[in-house]
Amino acid sequence: MEANNQDQNGRSGAVAAVEPGSSPRGKPRNLGAPLSSREREVVEMLAGGASGADIAERLVLSPETVRTHIRNAMAKLGASSRAQAVALAVQRQEIDWPSKGEPATARSDAGTTQGSARSRVGLVATGEADATLTELLTELTSLYEVDGGMIFVTDKDGLSLRRAALRESGSGEPEPPTRVQFGEGPLGRVALERRAQVIQGSGSRIPAGDRATVCVPMIAGGALVGVICLTFRPSRLIGRAELLLLQAFATRVAEILLSAEDHRQQRVKVALESFRASWSSSGR
């Protein structure tokens, strides 16, 4: 009997050692507990667009230590992804979402300077990324709650938006304009203020219906790359968490578009898959 108890205790201990972030019964440990000062610092840097490698370099930590802090923070927040962890940390007031001009909107891929970022914006304006953005919008509008959408890019004059991709909702509303001046209407204000907005209707000049369109700016390297607009069915309520997820995704897409590396289309697909997982989790 004693040997059997020892054997059972040994197996129980082994299971606990394999899952350090969970209780022996598989439930998240410390769920709801406040973040430590280091975990809060790491999540704040994630909110600013930093990667794990960036965080390790800035805080002079090993990559594994950073991953441990992220895992622990996700466990406490009940998050299934890093993007969701940021959104939940903001909701719990563990961190403040970076305001305009701070890292979340000012950061770009490593090695991208202000000058190169703005030159890349010029290339995007010429239509270089239109095919990638059209494919991206097709994938986004395949989400169950999304009823249509459009993506605008900053035009060559730097003072207006050019429509690069459109997926109509089929509601019979007027087609959105092909160009919008900064400050003109809700969409122009999103570009001018660099701030996400919820627009009633489909985002056209004449709002209608009970749907809502969320427009989020794509910003990287201090430059406005464009605006992503998605129209949601009434079944999907849009709250602060959803806005944060969409903004984080738009920022990542902008970073990829402004990077000088190849395989941007593939990298956008990877970012999209991560967004899909976070979006599904946030709606539960």
Image (spheres, grey):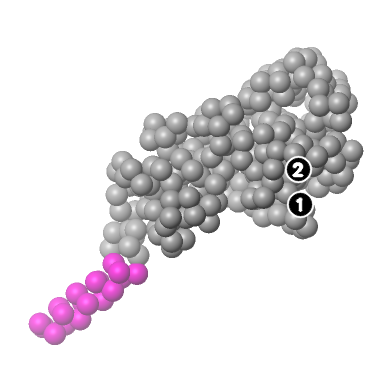
Quick check: is 42 in the magenta stretch? Answer: no
Q: CA distance from mark 1 to mark 2?
A: 9 Å
Is residue 20 visible to us here? Answer: yes
5, 125: nearer the viewer: 125
Could you tell me which residue is drawn at 67 percent across and 50 percent down?
111
**Quadrant of the rendered structure where residue 193 is?**
top right
Residue 216 in the image, given as x and y percentages of width and height = 66, 30
Could you tell me which residue is drawn at 53 percent across and 56 percent down?
53
Where 259 sits versus 96, above or below? Answer: below
Dot 2 falls on a residue whose secondary structure is: helix
Mark 1: which amino acid?
A: Ala
Is residue 141 visible to us here? Answer: no
Mark 2: which amino acid?
A: Ser
Magenta range: 1-18
Q: Which mark is residue 116?
A: 2
- In the rendered image, the quadrant that contains the N terminus is bottom left
Could you tell me which residue is drawn at 45 percent across and 31 percent down?
96
Residue 30 in the image, given as x and y percentages of width and height = 29, 49
Q: Which residue is mark 1?
A: 260
Residue 61 in the image, given as x and y percentages of width and height = 42, 57
